[in-house]
Image: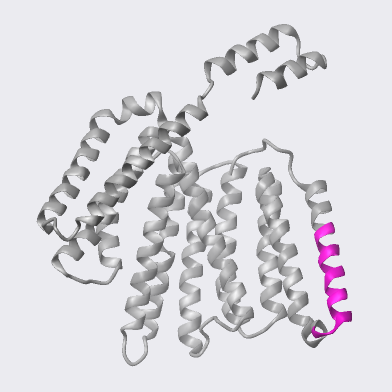
Amino acid sequence: MSARKIATWHDADLIDAATRDRLLAYEAAHARPLALWAVFGIGALAIGLGLISVIAANWEAIPGQVRLGVHLALIVAALAALFWSEARIAATTPWAAEALLFVTAALGLTFFGHLGQVYQTSSPLWQPLATWLVLFAPLLLLMGRSWPSALAVLGGAVWCVWDYADAVIGHSTPTPGTGLIAWAAFVVALPLALAPLAAWLRGRSDRHDFWRRLEQVTLAYAVAGASLAAIGASMGEVDSDNLTRGAVGMLVSGATAVLTGLGVITARSGVSGRMAGTIIALSGLVLPLAWGTDHLTVPPAALFMALWIGIAAAALMAGWRGVFQLSVAAIALRLIILSFELAGDLLTSGFGLILSGLLIVGVAWVAVRVSKTFAPPGGGAEA
């Protein structure tokens, strides 16, 4: 907030002189010299890029064991700094502690690739990812404070389980059996288990923001999976070549999501917790329904919009303004895409293009009106 804006508020009689002075004093005490930090950041980036360039130019000349030793020493040094100084750093500059934690986890992840490059070994990607999760996910969960750590935990878990499922199903001959499909579907949905854990710890930890972010990104994973399933069904991309295998896979993933949603509802009381759990459970219900509407046009679109209507209703009850507005936008966009899917040959004519343009403008206008009229007020309950 600028001093000029505070002065303008005082001149407009919105705040009195005492409030103006308190605001100015607060802003002065919490001012951040962004320009100075930007200069330091550019200098640090230049030094880092220079070091990387020097190492890259002489990469082959450096013995592999030396490179691995330096890499491992950096990890040990970062871990030592975290365990000895993390609390002190976080007390003064929380973002610095978060950055150090994220860099440590990144060093750990890249070490496995470096190890394979030195010794010319190869393995399925999920194996080093699983090892990294075992070694570094507990560190991120114990010390994480914001988005980077939460995304690292969930992103690593999602990447690992999807690569594992692809390897298991892709290498089965001649075709994967029903049991293998069910196992792969369960593994893919397994990262959702982070949501009840995060929901339970939100009110029991001094790192409330981290657990809130972890619950949010896990919820987003559930919604994204259900939305993509509905979109894939409209494109005929949902696997339904074998009715039994396709149904079992979607039912297992859907059931896992439903149980996870119930776990969130149980772990976190209050409207916000119930709505978050309901959205995850609703995403689970969409999965088998998406399989049942594969290769159709209108039913998958209706399923997608029903999912987001449910999310919008939950956002209204919980007071999540941003989520409600996102839901309205998703519904409007899907409605527009559906109109193109149904228009067919009309789009090749000028008259069809005019009708489509009018429909897009109309849907956008309705979406804006609905969002402005029904969206919860800003500053509502947090998800």
Residue 144, horizontal then vertical, whole percent: 38, 40
Residue 364, horizontal then vertical, whole percent: 80, 60
Q: Residue 361: say if magenta.
A: yes
State how the image is colored: one colour
Residue 170, compared with residue 283, is above or below; it is below
Q: Which residues are magenta?
A: 348-365
Which residue appears at 16% of the width and 47% of the height? 70
| Quadrant of the snapshot with the N terminus | top right
Q: Residue 268: say if magenta.
A: no
Residue nearest the viewer, comparing 335 with 226: 335
For residue 81, side relative to residue 163 (left or right): left
Which residue appears at 41% of the width and 57% of the height? 155
Which residue appears at 84% of the width and 58% of the height? 366
Is residue 204 shown to the viewer in this render?
A: no
Residue 252, compared with residue 350, is above or below; it is above
Q: Main secondary structure of the magenta part?
A: helix
Which residue is situated farthest in the bottom direction here? 174
Which residue appears at 37% of the width and 90% of the height? 175
Residue 334, compared with residue 88, is above or below; it is below
| Quadrant of the snapshot with the C terminus | top right
Which residue is situated farthest in the top direction here? 18
For residue 193, side relative to residue 227 (left or right): left
Is residue 347 shown to the viewer in this render?
A: yes
Residue 307, horizontal then vertical, whole percent: 65, 64
